[in-house]
Amino acid sequence: MKSFGLDRRKLLGRALALGALGSLSGCDFDHPNHPDLADRFLRAMSDWNDEVQAALFDPRTLAPTFKPSQITRPPRFNAFYDISQAPQVDAATWRLALTGRIGDKRPWRIGQLRAMPRESQITRLICVEGWRVVGQWSGVPLHHFLRKVNADLRARYVSIHCADGYFSSIDMASALHPQTILALDFLGAPLTAPFGAPLRLRIPTKLGFKNPKSIVALGVTNTYPGGYWENQGYNWFSGS
Ligand SMILES: Nc1nc2c(c(=O)[nH]1)N[C@H]1C(S)=C(S)[C@@H](COP(=O)(O)O)O[C@H]1N2
Ligand SMILES: [Mo]
């Protein structure tokens, strides 16, 4: 079984390399006469790559966890804008809207989420820009939340929209992974605005850009939802 694990890693590495190829913008690979063809080819490669990664994803394999002494201080901010532009969400009036294949679509208040069972993790967030940080997040396991609202767990995607217009989506198997949480706290205190207050997705089995901050809506759907960076060519699955 161990050697299978290694092979799986090697394969995944290759799949990721192909994902990186797929994420290069069309201009680098455009054939002067057939720009659309080159684009379509890379899109097809990246879609195929999503399927390979999804097939290789083992819902029982945990992302690495770290010791408190390994936590990166201070944490590092990233978004598609400067830290001073981070949305200021009032937790008191904030609501989490639910859409799509969910039985109970009543919006959630922050206090209701805080009353749910918690999971705490010290994990690593890896940004495609080439840096990584270790942090401690705690919050509601997404699998628990999805069951609570009677979501269709056989649907393909969970989509997430944010207060700043950012959005992303993940496959259902990754959504149900035990380390995928709707994070409320960082280092034992409520998330601050730039780091995703009042609620962010923390999914240590995926790259940083699949960890949307300041969530305002969550949906369950069979229609491919894409994402802010995903729609600009980043590989959709992006396991880490
Ligand atoms: N709402 C929102 N969430 C977001 C982003 C963003 O621009 N807006 N950027 C993503 C990217 S690219 C990364 S690497 C992580 C960074 O999270 P951090 O600021 O906690 O390090 O947030 C992700 N979630
Ligand atoms: Mo990122």
Image (cartoon, rainbow, N blue to C red):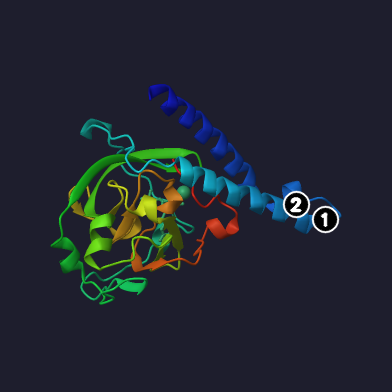
* Quarter of the view holding residue 167: bottom left
Q: Nearer the viewer, residue 240 or 220?
A: 220
Residue 184 visible, this orientation:
no
Q: Which mark is residue 123?
A: none
Q: In this view, does 136 lie above or below 2?
A: below
**Residue 60's spot in the image, x, y percent?**
32, 40
> Could you say whether the residue bearing mark 1 is in a helix, strand or loop?
loop
Residue under numbered circle 2: 38
Q: Which amino acid does label 1 sit on?
A: His
Label pair 2/1, CB-CB below 8 angstroms: yes
Q: In which quarter of the image is the N terminus?
A: top left
* Quarter of the view holding residue 149: bottom left
Residue that appears at 59% across and 52% down: 47
**Residue 8's spot in the image, x, y percent?**
47, 31
Residue under numbered circle 1: 34
Q: Nearer the viewer, residue 134 or 192?
A: 134
Residue that appears at 28% across and 61% down: 199
Q: Quadrant of the C terminus?
A: top left
Q: Residue furthest right?
A: 33
Residue that appears at 39% across and 58% down: 212
Disc 1 crowd rating (10 Å Cα; few below 14, some 14-19, many 20+) is few
Residue 124 visible, this orientation:
yes
Disc 2 crowd rating (10 Å Cα; few below 14, some 14-19, many 20+) is some
**Residue 185's spot in the image, x, y percent?**
22, 53
Q: What residue type is labelled 2?
A: Ala
> Could you say whether the residue bearing mark 2 is in a helix, strand or loop?
helix
Number of numbered labels in the structure image: 2
**Residue 10's spot in the image, x, y percent?**
51, 29
Q: In this view, does 126 lie to the left or right of 177?
A: right
Q: Give how far apart the Cα atoms at labels 2 and 1 are.
A: 7 Å
